[in-house]
Amino acid sequence: MESKAIAIQQDQGQARRLLIAGFAALTLAVAFVFAQVTIAYAQERPATFADLADQVSPSVVNITTSTVIAGRTGPQGLLPEGSPFEDFFNDLERGPGQGQGAQRSSALGSGFVISADGYIVTNNHVIEGADEILIEFYPGGEPGVPAELIGTDPNTDIAVLKVDLENLPYVEFGDSNDVGARVGDWVLAMGNPLGQGFSISAGIVSARNRSLQGTYDDYIQTDAAINRGNSGGPLFNMDGQVVGVNTAILSPNGGSIGIGFAMSSAVVKNVVDQLKEFGETRRGWLGVRIQDVTPDMIDAIDGLDLARGALVTDVPAGPAEDAGMLSGDVIVNFDGIAIEDTRELVRIVGNSPVGKEVPVEVLRNGDMAELTVVLGRRETSEAVAFPVSEEVEEAPEAAEILGLTLSEITEELVEQYGLNIESGLVITGINPSSEAASKGLIEGDVITEAGQQAVTTIADLEGRIQEAKDGGRKSLLMLVRRGGDPRFVALPLED
């Protein structure tokens, strides 16, 4: 019995030793695989940017501008007056200048060559108001070459120049929406920071689709060092393609803190093509006024499951009206692209060719409707005023509804609030603790629609409210106009 017990103990000991050996082998294998993955990841990082810098540097230029300005005192602003970034960002190129009397002011910026025959891209604010524009090529190239201004687009802060030279080294635009410009991808910024001459800085794409304050903004945010003088310079991917144009920095002191913005090539390329061909931009125009769909509107709009799309608030005479679009439609798809919000729709429409036939899907009364819109041109059509009638009929009926004191339009109210609309319900009072007040409604606003139907009398509104309650709705969508500008507001219904 004793020998049998010893044998069992020996078997158990051997099993433990085998188990420990197996675990050790497994641990070693896992460590080996992890080490291999780590090595592979490290190998994906560039060991040097020297080859890429050698490849693209000859296409990058310094830009010097000079302007005769009237007398001014004190330091010159960080952004030229009227620049689209004046209120928010420090410029990347302007230097201080002071004195009195007429004087010649100079400024520095960057740019890059996009064709062998001398077309150059830079920022509009680099050359804005300049009397003379001189181009300095990469060391060893032509110095002080005069440049002709081909065209500018203040909306995207892009300008195209032309020099009278041939066989120039140039770079091409890449797809800023493709691999090479994703969040986390390496990028290289080049330019003339602080007037020190050609310089490069490397970093990654920190964020995408940033909006600063422009209608067509689509900025790439990067931590590659960008400073004054980098304005208009290129942001390269690792294939040597331009994925952005360095435009602005966010900084408390005017220096780089790793928050720089480059307008994406997806926007720039289209603008550059138009400036080269026409000397101006020709953007598509849908012909509607729109607003974002907010979460509190979901219950008030039939068939809407998420706060997405662009809610149409007004349809003047134009492309959308010709296609049959109506106020209250929610645009959910434009030219095959799902629309998340109004900013995305405006950018996509603006980048579409004038005259293009575009399929548009809208949500209308709970059903999807397919329309075909022939786009107009924004630059010539947007300023057309909405037709308004000057005739106003007095309708003195008033009531308190949903925290609002409402009155049908009268001549006195038209004069009191400066109204330019012929029908609807005027807000003449508002309960400050009501939901209507929290939504930003004020006296003088005019409600023209409720439940996506026109309202001209108190009875109309009461009918819309009752219909919404009968349908089990908890809120009612109203179209409110203020100074001619419409917007939808969803108000909760009282029990």
Image: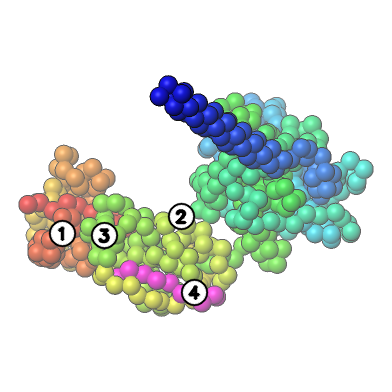
Which is more foreground, mark 3 or mark 2? 2
Badge count: 4
Closest to the observer: 218 or 3?
3
Q: Which class describes the residues within 10 Å of circle 4: few (<14), some (14-19), or many (20+)?
A: some
Q: Which mark is residue 358?
A: 4
Q: Residue at point 70% right, 67% down?
A: 277
Say what amino acid the circle numbered 2 marks: Arg
Magenta stretch bounds? 355-364
Which is more foreground, mark 1 or mark 4? 1
Rendered location of residue 292, percent (x, y) = 36, 55
Rendered location of residue 294, percent (x, y) = 31, 52
Residue under label 3: 479
Report, in whole angstroms, how far the alpha carbon at label 4 lies from the one at label 2. 18 Å
> In this orientation, does residue 223 appear?
no
In the rendered structure, the answer to whether residue 375 lies left or right of residue 116 reads left
Q: Secondary structure at mark 3?
A: strand
Closest to the observer: 214 or 202?
202
Residue under label 1: 473
In the depicted structure, whether residue 368 falls above or below residue 305: below
Report, in whole angstroms, how far the alpha carbon at label 3 lies from the one at label 2. 20 Å
Rendered location of residue 220, percent (x, y) = 59, 46
Report, in whole angstroms, how far the alpha carbon at label 3 lies from the one at label 4. 27 Å
Q: Are marks 1 and 3 in contact (CB under 8 Å)?
A: no
Q: Residue at point 38% right, 65% down?
A: 331
